[in-house]
Image: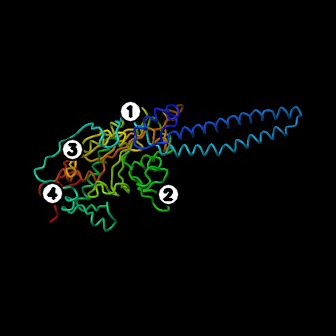
Amino acid sequence: MISVKELREDYEKVVKSLSKREGEFNLSLFKELDEKRKNYILEVEKLKSDQNKVSKQVPIMKKEGQDVTEVLKEMKELSNKIKELDPKLKSVDMEIEQLLLSIPNVPDDSVPAGKSDEENVEMRVVGEIRKFDFEPKPHWDLGEDLGILDSATAGKVTGSRFHFYKGDGARLERALYNFMLDTHNDNGYTELIVPAMVNKDSMQGTGQLPKFEEDLFKVEDTNYYMIPTAEVPITNFHRDEILKGSDLPLKYCGLSTNFRKEAGSAGRDTRGLIRQHQFAKVELVLFVKEEESFKALEELTKDAERILQLLKLPYRVVNLCTGDLGFSSTKTYDIEVWLPSYNRYVEISSCSNFVGFQGRRANIRYKEDVKSKTKHVHTLNGSGLALGRTVAAVLENYQQEDGSILIPDVLVPYFRKEKIEKSK
């Protein structure tokens, strides 16, 4: 959540920054609730001060042989008034917390203003787009022709937006995620295998709840949700902890199967692997000191880009505008891979800096040493990469006129063949 301290000390600046985002945020309510809270606290402090003064009279009056009945009665009245205020203070604190949970992160000043992805700013373009001397096919047709992707059977078994990966299709995805994990391990990331379900506190800690409830799969009659990304369990790995500053940065990577309802996306990317209810992803998560997070964002993005560079897939990096920025992010770079079937670049990774937003929600802090004050850790995450989209990009960009697929050189040791061909 956004910083209460920043809201109190620089309210107008926060309001101005959030006005660049799409949507309306009732920050005026925060001022009302915070003023109410302040008055309750002042009232409690005054009552406790009066109670303290009265209590000091009791031993003196007893020593002098005076009747203390009225003084004790006054003390009890003061105590009752304090008790009456306690639930009111707790209630307003809860109202403030619930309000802040619904307010997105403040965009960094380096984030371009804009209302939609059309106003994202291109940062760099890497690699050359292949010029085909034949009519290229989309990955869903390639996969069906080669017998390596099967959406029809998945539709029978489950429903729309699911796929069976078959034979070399399954082998290709497995080769890709092993290659990705090994590459990130070499870059200093600690590999995790994460739970596919998390509890409500974990979803709230990373910002999925309450905002994105409709996009999540909840396990009925439980407190569990299917994860939409490994970001959720990995970030919550350190929930309610105080980390040592000397241990930062902490770098994790994890492969996970993810689940999203894709609510509100009816009619979009209904064919192929781009928008599925279930998909695999290798995720990168960083825990860093507050002064290092923007430098870490640049490094994280380069780590994700490295996968596409090694696969020799053309891509570009864009700086998301305020209208396209994710709820929890203060700044995000999208990495978009070239897909011939779309005749454009398509998102394959989002690398985001959340500053202290998730650290406050998940109560993750750090201390430089025993004597120093605790600070909220800054968190970052990025896909390194989304596997279904990477499979699609390899199939489309490496397709041959005869319908076969060449395997990128870096993948051959993992795939153990140089080409995917139709089974005879």
- Mark 4 or mark 2, which has the lower sequence index? 2
Q: Which residue is mark 1?
A: 109
- Contact between marks 2 and 3 (CB within 8 A): the answer is no
Identify the element where label 3 is drawn: loop
In this view, the mark in front (1 or 4): 1
Identify the element where label 2 is drawn: loop
Left or right, 46 with respect to 310, comes to right
Identify the element where label 1 is drawn: loop
Q: Position of residue 239 (x, y in %)?
A: 48, 45
Three-letter code for the amino acid on which mark 2 is drawn: Asn
Q: Is 408 placed above or below 68 here?
A: below
Q: CA distance from mark 4 to mark 2?
A: 46 Å
Three-letter code for the amino acid on which mark 3 is drawn: Pro
Q: Which residue is mark 2?
A: 223
Near mark 4 (Cα within 10 A), the count class, few <14, some 14-19 or many ≥20, is some
Q: Which residue is mark 3?
A: 314
Left or right, 207 with respect to 253, comes to right
Three-letter code for the amino acid on which mark 4 is drawn: Ser
Q: CA distance from mark 3 to mark 4?
A: 20 Å
Near mark 2 (Cα within 10 A), the count class, few <14, some 14-19 or many ≥20, is few
In this view, the mark in front (3 or 1): 1
Q: Quadrant of residue 302?
A: top left
Q: Position of residue 13 (x, y in %)?
A: 46, 32
Q: Which residue is mark 4?
A: 404
